[in-house]
């Protein structure tokens, strides 16, 4: 009697404990799910800011900068025991170079994140197009099989329709795989778990832009960090010449200082020229990408019209199912070509702004995540003199 009562008591405790544990598991799972589902879609600006704050590439750049700052402090302390004006100048320049490199990494990272963001938008649309293509291929196969059963088409038509369906299914698998990799890449840039869910707030659209190349070049020559680094080197070499210009410094050392200054001046001039050439090339690539979008759009309209005609002619028995399949493939490929053109344009625009040497704050003024969330120019920036765009 006692043993039975004790057993029921233990069973009751075990049962209550299990219920409590299960409840905690459900609450935890629901909490995680709610947290994930409550996270709003990620805008482009938010993605950029997260990457600059938490991305591994920026963490590495930050540690490199900290290392250089510590080396600067160490060298500065050592110079207290053995003072040297040139060594002090060199130490300060080394720190300045490290700071410039860090800023360059930040600037480049903005463009990298933008491209990764646009790539996901493109691949998401590619998945939708592939799904629609499968739906069309399935309907085509059903139609051909029905006609084949009535002796209206040959077996080759059925084989062709089956092949197109298999190809469409393969295209979908490829698109989904590429999308998964693209999301992992963005998570890597953001410093998140590679398999963390990714939901973006934008769609990939085409917003034409007008850019003044001359003003853009002026802006780049004033803001590109590579130029500032070269100017820092000229300042250092100029100070070296000033320090070595005295009766106590050997003539050969004075001459070496003069040559070093001339080299730094030539290097500065080369960098300025290379940046102008680079900007011109990127500008032309941007214009080419911009012109390609409306051309691809017209090609898409034409392909869709051809498809409508082909479908009507197929229903009338004028053309074969294979010819109809060819028309559908052409429309599908043209849809993807148009999508690629829009992607190329947005990436080209991102690269152009990056080539100007804009800071993060200035870039935020240029692109906005409002509306469709794509890169847009502010119409009043040229009047304000903030950026070389209009």
Image (cartoon, helix red, strand yellow):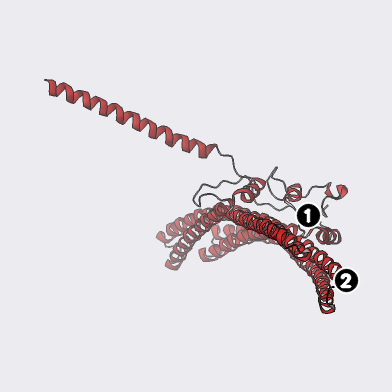
Q: List x then y, in percent, for residue 174.
A: 50, 60
Residue 246, label in figure: 2
Relative height, residue 281 to residue 304 (above, below): below
358 or 319: nearer the viewer: 358
Is residue 270 something that shows in the picture? yes
In this view, the residue farthest toward the bottom is 252
**C-alpha span from label 1 to label 2:** 57 Å
For mark 1, give the secondary structure.
Answer: loop
Q: List x then y, in percent, for residue 118.
A: 63, 54
Neighbours of disc 1 within 10 Å: few (<14), some (14-19), many (20+): some
Residue 209, label in figure: 1
385 lies left or right of 95: right
Which quarter of the rendering shows the N terminus?
top left
376 lies left or right of 195: right
For mark 2, give the secondary structure.
Answer: loop
Q: Where on the picture, by quarter, is residue 122? A: bottom right
Neighbours of disc 2 within 10 Å: few (<14), some (14-19), many (20+): few
């Amino acid at each position: 009697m006692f043993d039975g009562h004790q057993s029921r008591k233990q069973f009751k405790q075990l049962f209550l404990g299990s219920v409590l544990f299960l409840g905690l598991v459900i609450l935890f799972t629901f909490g995680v799910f709610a947290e994930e589902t409550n996270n709003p879609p990620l805008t482009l600006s938010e993605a950029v800011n997260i990457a600059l704050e938490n991305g591994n590439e920026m963490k590495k750049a930050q540690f490199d900068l900290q290392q250089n700052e510590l080396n600067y402090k160490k060298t500065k302390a050592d110079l207290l025991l053995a003072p040297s004006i040139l060594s002090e100048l060199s130490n300060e320049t080394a720190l300045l170079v490290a700071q410039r490199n860090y800023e360059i990494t930040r600037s480049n990272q903005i463009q990298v994140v933008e491209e990764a963001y646009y790539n996901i938008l493109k691949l998401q649309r590619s998945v939708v197009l592939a799904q629609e293509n499968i739906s069309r291929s399935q309907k085509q196969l059903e139609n051909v099989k029905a006609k084949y059963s009535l002796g209206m088409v040959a077996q080759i038509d059925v084989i062709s329709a089956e092949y197109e369906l298999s190809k469409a299914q393969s295209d979908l698998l490829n698109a989904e795989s590429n999308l998964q990799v693209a999301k992992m890449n963005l998570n890597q840039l953001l410093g998140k778990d590679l398999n963390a869910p990714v939901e973006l707030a934008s769609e990939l659209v085409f917003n034409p832009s007008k850019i003044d190349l001359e003003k853009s070049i002026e802006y780049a020559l004033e803001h590109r960090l590579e130029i500032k680094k070269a100017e820092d080197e000229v300042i250092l070499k100029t100070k070296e010449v000033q320090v070595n210009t005295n009766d106590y410094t050997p003539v050969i050392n004075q001459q070496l200082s003069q040559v070093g200054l001339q080299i730094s001046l030539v290097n500065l001039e080369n960098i300025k020229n290379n940046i102008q050439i680079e900007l011109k090339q990127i500008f032309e690539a941007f214009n080419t990408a911009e012109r390609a979008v409306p051309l691809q759009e017209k090609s898409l309209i034409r392909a869709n019209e051809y498809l409508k005609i082909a479908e009507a002619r197929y229903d009338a028995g004028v053309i074969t199912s294979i010819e109809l399949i060819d028309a559908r493939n052409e429309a599908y490929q043209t849809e993807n070509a148009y999508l690629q053109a829009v992607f190329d344009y947005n990436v080209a625009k991102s690269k152009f702004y990056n080539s100007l040497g804009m800071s993060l704050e200035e870039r935020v003024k240029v692109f906005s995540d409002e509306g469709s969330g794509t890169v847009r120019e502010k119409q009043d920036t040229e009047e304000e003199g903030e950026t070389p765009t209009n």
